[in-house]
Structures are given as C-alpha cells and as structure tokens.
Amino acid sequence: MSVPAWLCIPFAGLLLCVALFPIILGTWWDNARNKIMVVAGWSVMMAVLFASQFGAGKTMETILDCVVNDYLTFIVLLFGLFCVAGNISFEGDLAGSPGVNVVLLLIGTLLSSVIGTTGSSMLMVRPVIKMNSWRRRKSHIMIFFIFMVSNMGGCLTPMGDPPLLMGFMRGVPFAWSLRLSPILAFNLLILLTIFYHLDKHYYRQDIAQGYRPDLTKPGTDLKLSGVHNFLFLVMIVAAVILSGTLPLLPAFQDASGNVLGLTIMKGVSLPWPSVIEVVMILAAAWLSFKTTPKEVRKKNHFTWGAIQEVAILFVGIFITMQPALLLLKQVGPGLGITKAYQMFWATGALSSFLDNTPTYLVFLTTAGSLGFTQGINTTLGIVPQKMLMAISSGAVFMGAITYIGNAPNFMVKSMSDENGIRMPSFFGYMKWSIAILVPVFLLDTLIFFR
C-alpha cells in the first residue's frame, strides 16, 4: 500500500510536544494526566488520518499489531529490568570523580553486550547517580552514560540491542557482532578521553566552590544489597534470548513456517515465544519484589515515576510512528543506497527518531536484495561484511542522538531528573550529541566504512 507522507504529522507533532512542552509548560507537563491527554490526542489523530486513507479495519489491525507485538514486549522488558535493578543497592564511600566515573562508564558499556543496553542502564544508573550526588555539575555524566552504556555498548552480541537480535534471527551468526569490537574500542577511546577532561574541568569547579563528598568513612567500603536479584536479571536475559531463538524451532512454526501464536484478532497475534518472554520477565519482577526487603528499595529512592512517564509517552510514540515506518519500508529500496557509508548514515539517522529494530530490518533487507555474491549469507540475501557492519553500527550507535533513539535513553533521563540532576531538554541534549557524537561517527565513516 502507498503511504502518503502527511500521515506522519501526528508523529512529528508528538515529538515536538515531547521536545517543547517541558520547556514552555514545565509544571503542566509534569502532571501525568496531561501527558496522557497529549498522547491520546495525537494517537487519535493518527488513527483518524490513517482510517481516512486505508479504512477502519486496517487502522485497527495496524494499531493493535503495534501495541501487541512492539509496545507490549518493549514496556514489559523495561518494567522487568527497572524492577529487578531497583532491588539491587550499591552502597559505599566511593565518591564520583573523573577517574571513578570513567571506570563506571567503561564497566557499564561492557556489561551492555552481556545483559543488554536496557539491563546495563538500569543496573548502573543508580550507582552512578549515588556516587555523584555530592556534585553540583553532573548532567554531562548522564549524557555520556546514555552515549556509551545505553547505546554503543550493546553492539557486541545479539543480546546487546534488539536490532542485532533480529539479525541473528535472520541468519547472521551469533558471534559475528564481535567484529564490531574495533569500532567500539575506537569510539570508547575518544569518548572516554573527552569525558575525562570535561569531567575533570567540572570536578575542579565543584571543589573550588566548596562541594565535597561525604568521606566520613576511610577507604573504599563498598557493599552490594539484593545480590540474589542478579539471578532474576539472568532470567530476563534468558527470556530475551528465547524470544529470538524459539521462533526458529519447528515446534513453534506452522506448516508454512509462520510462527504460531495467540490470536488477538484476524491478522494480529502474539507469538508464543513472546508470550513466554513476557511471562518470564513478569515472573522475574514479581519474584524480585517478593524476595527483597523494602529497605533496599528505600536506599535506592525507588519510585514508579520514571517507568510511568516512559510507559505513557512511548505508547503514543509507537502508535504514531507506524506510518513513518511503513513509509520507510515503501521508499527504502528505492533510495539508491548501495555503499557501506550510506547504509551507516541512513540506518543511523532514522534510528535516532524511529524504532531502530524495524529501521535495521529495512536496510538489511535492502542490502540483501542488491545481488551481492560475497559476504554474510542471511535469509534476506547475501550482505557484504562491511555493509552489515555499517547497518549494525548505525542502528546501535546513533540511537544515542536523541532521547527517543533507544529504549533506555529516556528512562535514564527520567531517573536523572527524578534524582535532582537537571538534564538538558530534547533539543539541548541533541546539541551535545551532535557536537560530540557526529564527529566521532564521521571518523568511523572514514576509517571503517569507506
């Protein structure tokens, strides 16, 4: 079906509200009911416009399929990781300093490929906030946290970020993503160097103005509470892996090779692997709360505000972005993108505003249809190694360009705001990402994707 560009107006409108309302209507926007009104308004507009073009039946199917197969698994995963990570408390007298913060960001980045960018972000964000609570200037710490922990670190395994999991489901070897390690190492070297000098500058300003960490206890007395919750974290990671591998098994396929599932309505079903994933994640969250004392959550200043805000905003984003995704699928093959560097920037630029998983699949499909005879043999066709690296890097790395580019970005922002860290606005954050990340990505282009 042909999708007109004007159907993307509700998506653009909602993004503008997310970007501008916190600035011009800050107090009003802080009320959850007002966010719900805005999200509902743009979602209804999308439904009306879409129905005028394709009919009520197709509109209902598109929205329901989006909510059931995209938003549901997205928010359940985020909710599960938020709950489990909230029951792990890191205490100690290790104060945030440039050296300590570099180590924390490096650990979080490497963890992202093991437990996913969302898992690592939820696990590391509270310790980073706690250790730097004494500082006055600290928003830059969370900005670099989003750059590295919430995005780039997920590039080394299919568990790291959903696009790579989709690639694995389509024939990309599991260990292939490790080929991206030189690019990650190069980017980390640059970003951590920039961060260290920037953090040292702000650190010295804080010290000069009389800000001091509370170091009443000597040494590095560090303590982890709720350690058993790492088992539930592993349970969630296992659920994500199963959701990507079970659809490949004959037991979960019909005679035509389609994945079996729970039928919601004609044309919309929730695959059984996704049902298993949702049940496992919710079970992990429930067990985490049942087995962890309330005192641990109190130490973490645990509240539901951040996950509530993300749940409200992203249901609208997922619904209103559907015409944009359909338009991308429609025009993608005809864009004339045939080079690795073009794939890197096209995939990355669109992943900054759209869901990076379908964007990755559009360009992977495009690459597989170009008739190459050498490269990685996927179910979508043969894709040259450099081109696959470009598509994967673009989808994973450039999700850091905006707050909505990857699932944990907005969550980290919300949790930072909730803990008194004044994060930049939507466009303010983009000033940071464009100034710091775009030059790094240009170097990536020259060195790895020419």
Image (spheres, rainbow, N blue to C red):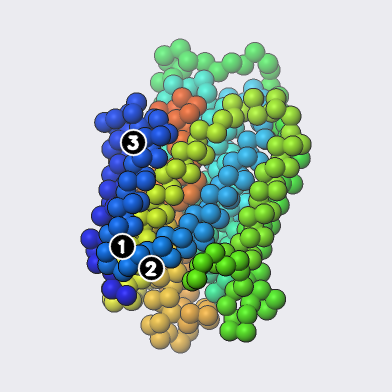
Residue at image coords 47%, 32%: 416
Q: Is residue 233 visible?
A: no
Q: Position of residue 372 (x, y in %)?
A: 42, 84
As drawn, 382 above or below 264: below
Residue on which disc 1 sits: 50
Residue at image coords 48%, 44%: 311
Q: Please name the amino acid that badge 2 sits on.
A: Lys
| Left or right side of 91 for 47 | left
Residue at image coords 70%, 37%: 289
Quadrant in which residue 84 is drawn: top right
| Left or right side of 108 for 202 | left
- Cβ atoms under marks 3 and 2 closer than 8 Å: no
CA–CA distance between discs 1 and 3?
31 Å
CA–CA distance between discs 2 and 1?
8 Å
**Callout 2 secondary element:** helix
Q: Nearer the viewer, mark 3 or mark 2?
A: 2
Quadrant in which residue 240 is drawn: bottom right
Badge 3 crowding class, 10 Å Cα cut-off, few under 14, some 14 to 19, many 20 or more, is some
Which of the two labelled residues, at mark 3 and mark 2, occupies the earlier sequence position?
2
| Left or right side of 420 for 338 | left
Residue on which disc 3 sits: 425
As drawn, 76 above or below 245: above
Q: Please name the amino acid that badge 3 sits on.
A: Ser
Quadrant in which residue 219 is drawn: top right
Residue on which disc 2 sits: 58
Q: Give the camera-side residue of 173 and 122.
A: 122
**Callout 3 secondary element:** loop
Q: Nearer the viewer, mark 1 or mark 3?
A: 1
Q: Position of residue 431 (x, y in %)?
A: 30, 41
Q: Position of residue 159 (x, y in %)?
A: 60, 58
Q: Is residue 414 visible?
A: yes
- Cβ atoms under marks 2 and 1 closer than 8 Å: yes
